[in-house]
Amino acid sequence: MTTNSDTATETDPGYPRHWEADVVASDGGIVHLRPILPSDADALLRFHQSLSERTRYLRYFGPYPRIPPRDLERFTNVDHRTRVALICLLGDEIIAVGRYEGLPRPDGRVESAEVAFVARDDHQGRGLGSILLEHLTAAARENGLRRFEAEVLVENHQMVRVFRDAGYQVSREFAEGVLHLEFDIDPTERSLAVRDSREQRAEARSVHNALHPTSVAVIGASTDPSKIGHAVLANLLRANFTGPVYPVNPDARSVRGVRAYASVTDIPDEVDLAVVAVPAAGIDEVMDSCLEKGVTTLVVVSAGFADVGESGVVAERRLVSEARAHGMRVIGPNALGVVNNDPAVRLNATLAPDLPGAGRVGFFSQSGALGIAILAAAKERGLGLSTFVSAGNRADLSGNDLLQYWQTDPNTDVVLLYLETFGNPRKFARLARRLARTKPIVAVKSGRHSGPTPALAASAARIDEASVRALFEQAGVIRVETLAQLFDTALLLAYQPLPAGPRVAVVGNSSAIGVLVSDALLDGGMELAGPPIDVGTAARPEEFAAAVGRAIRDDPEDGTAGGDAGGADALIAVFVPPIAIPGAEYARALRGAVAGSDKPVAAVFLAAEGVPAELSVAREDGSPGPGSVPSYPSPERAAAALARVSRYASWRSRPVGEFVSPPGIDAERARGVVARLGAEHSHRLGDAEAVELLACYGVPVTDFRVVSDADAAVAAAEGLGYPVALKAIGDRWRHRTDLVGVRLDLDTPSGVRRAHADLARLTGQSEVYVQRMAPKGISCVLEIIDDPSFGSLLSFGLSGMATELLGDRAFRVVPVSDQDAASLVRAPRAAPLLAGYRGTEPVDLAALEDLVLRVGRIAEDLPGVRSLVLDPVLASAEGVFVTGARIVLGPQPTRHDEGPRRLS
């Protein structure tokens, strides 16, 4: 499809194509936003004629029945700088317009503009005014404007509310029925929070629409049971979907006894969700009919798109572009489908014939092929699901959308993710960090060594393993390596409370298995609340239950065996059935003993996996509910699941963390420095330039001089003050771990001369650094690392050959909170050296955290800083001293999670 904007760049090189965006409106539908063009004149006239007299009066302060030719020329011909107009489109029709007109000062400069917008009556209430305001302010800031003004009739309550709720500090003046509003357009903490809140509600609504359809059409519903269209229809009917189901098949009168229609446009009622099961070659015709019908969501289970190569990628992008242009969302292509187990919906629009029972676990899977196996495994283990979405190629709707939905979904308490790629990892980090504070997230991230599948690579951000680890750790996501570990962890989270601490009691009828459990717990970083309690193989069910009850209640009274479980935060019960003694009675006894406990309990009933009926606390429909005890087939799996849950509980109990800005930061000055030095091409800053940029963020570098002979070295040392260090020029010598290119603690002129001569012989050049000695301390390295998906990561570690050999570095994704900074400097395995190891004096960790926050601000404020290395940083009780810095500037990476709301 060729659009006006496709040819705009050919006729108008100043057209800001990067302003174009697909945005989710508050009702979950999609609108396309772009700058206005002269060729939009006819569409603008139609738009104006569609407005009611009342809407035109509120916008233009009086009757304005038609747009005169002179005004039409002015409205559609803008310079995209001091005069900007944006339009929201549904198909080819304009449904909203927003614009600003610059207000020149007496000296001709334009720093403020008057802003206004209007939406078609039938699209008012969809949040289009807020969307336009977000994008207009972003465009204005890009063009150097600082302030907006608006004239609004006092009875125009909707418009007043848009400005009032935007999060800016708005000043008001009232005269003759008109409100004059003014506000600075620089983002504020509140305006960003408002943006994120609106984004969450809108994207959650779009997923809600997909999971709560009132009607479903299956396009390609074959009469052949071997075809996928037939399978989807059969599963919808088998699940007893609460709304009407319409098979679409031009060659059949009915499918599975349900009347069929030749086209979706022939269906007499509205269609919310269409499941597309036709070959990729026929997708254009299907799209046309769905657009005409007004379908809101497409689930494309057909393959043959990005999964087959470049031609498929083009077809897939065209599919999504067409769907979004007409307000639709797409799940897939190559998707397994969607499930909603809510009894009020009962939706199984997938290829999977058997579903797990209803539960409170949401599951998102990128893989359609694995979807059926995932659903079967969940059912086998007794793990109930609230919703399930398999997005396949993830061309449009993604895991981030599901995180937005589950944030406020009252039917979901636990979130499971099977991920192959990240489309927008910065956004994922932000959403996951927020969601995990209230609902645990367990994720399998495949492709750790091989990368994503070809179908997903086209829409994926490449992200290395260190970045994934940092992202999950910061966001509180429970990372697992396999699907078995995913389900092991999910069972405990779904049915048992979180532990208050790491102490675990072990009760069983086998001392050997008890020892295995203890070893596995200690290996996982847990603590034993006492020796394992062995009730003996001859213990009756009531004796087994009594021992479990005492352990879970922290009752020191124990007349059966081996000590107490004082202060337990969790319990693992082990039962090995003796010959000819069934375990069912023991399982029921265990369930009764722990009923109502606020501590998590896991069972190791060997050979039993999941939630057997004897350990289940059944819901009304018979599925396991809260209080059910998950069973594991081995001690190691039970202990590992409990350890993962305990680490998550510990993360969740920590303070949320604040994104504080340390004092003494001058970001505007720093941006000016970067602009002056240039970041169009990658280049390394000189020493003086690096010092100047770091000074903008309150990061001083220990005083130094660059000299070219021994006499100058002595003069520099005397000027700096003894003792000094001499360092060879060039990273080859200066940053070696054996310090071959460095001479330290020089406190006499003769010592300086000898050191200069040594370095000159070593390097073959006479130029060296002379630097004042910093206080002795532990040498550390703090870096900004360029990551193509995130833009920047922070890396921290202690200096030394062993550290480099073992890769003992910790990473954090920017932005970093104060809690992130505190955890980063304590994360390396060698970090105990900083806290005072074996009686040594602790370093000033607060100063080290402050340095991390400052460098984090550099990474966030200055995306043109593609690399920064502070090496070495000497940390001691006296503070933190930066003695070396290297900075590389380069072209800014694209940050999809910044600026106004938009879909990728």
Image (tube, grey):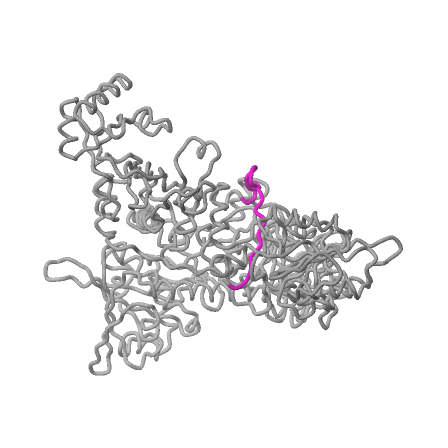
Image x and y of residue 760, in percent? 24, 19
Residue 671 shows in this picture: no
Image quarter of residue 118:
bottom left
Whether residue 624 appears in this view of the structure is yes
Extreme left residue here? 107
Relative side of 837 to 189, left or right: right
Asked if the magenta segment contains residue 506, the reply would be: no
**Residue 69, quarter of picture:** bottom left
Left or right of residue 262: residue 101: left
Residue drawn at point x = 28 percent, y = 34 percent: 684
Image quadrant assignment for residue 624:
bottom right
Q: Residue at x 52, y 61 (%)?
A: 328
From the viewer's perspective, is 472 left or right of 172? right
Q: Hey, which residue is sitting farthest right in the picture?
A: 580
Rendered position, 483 above or below 650: above
576 and 683: which one is in front? 576
Report whether 286 appears left or right of 724: right
Q: Tell me the residue at 38%/59% (across/down).
A: 658
Specify whether residue 452 is painted magenta: yes
**Residue range highlighted in magenta:** 438-456
Work out whether residue 491 or residue 644 is closer to the camera in this orientation and state it: 644
Residue 678 horizontal/vertical position (percent): 25, 40
Q: Position of residue 455 (x, y in %)?
A: 56, 43
